[in-house]
Amino acid sequence: MRMHLTTAAAGLLLLAGVGAAAAQDVVIQPEQETVIKEYVHKQPLASVKLPGVELNVGTALPDTVELHEVPNVKYRYVVVDNRTVVVDPGTRKIVKIIQ
């Protein structure tokens, strides 16, 4: 019985690791990226500073940062240090940095 529990636990941990890795690999389709770039160009925002926050894919932005909607796109955006940052609104994690 103990062997079955150990095997089940190991399998569960393996699946959890695969799920976490898949969640980090967000792919924004080129069409969506184009829509986002065009919208951001037409709706410029003032750049904000976030001291102590590294702008990397996967970094979660603080709740104090206002995320802005792009019509017909599930992601939101904000301009940080003059860089457009695309964010998953559910997790507030950066999914793409557009130069």
Image (cartoon, rainbow, N blue to C red):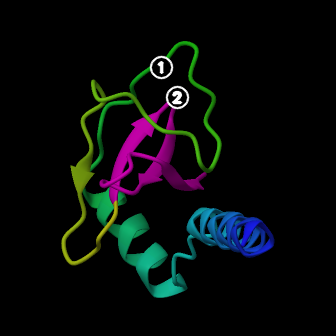
Question: Number of numbered discs present?
Answer: 2
Front position among marks 1 and 2: 1
Q: Nearer the viewer, residue 2 or 13?
A: 2
- For the residue carrying disc 2, how many other residues have a C-alpha within 10 Å: few (<14), some (14-19), or many (20+)? some
Is 89 magenta? The answer is: yes
Label located before the other in sequence (1 or 2): 1
**Amino acid type, mark 2:** Asp
Q: Which residue is mark 1?
A: 50
**Amino acid type, mark 1:** Leu
Coordinates of residue 73 in the picture (x, y in percent): 28, 74
Magenta stretch?
76-99
Classify 93 as above or below 9. Answer: above
Question: SS at mark 1?
Answer: loop
**Mark 1 in CB contact with mark 2 (< 8 angstroms):** yes
Residue for point 65% across, 42% down: 56
Q: Residue furthest top?
A: 51
- For the residue carrying disc 1, how many other residues have a C-alpha within 10 Å: few (<14), some (14-19), or many (20+)? few
Magenta segment, prevailing SS (helix, strand or loop): strand
The numbered disc on residue 81 is: 2
- Residue 7 vs residue 58: left or right? right
> Residue 38: which quarter of the image?
bottom left
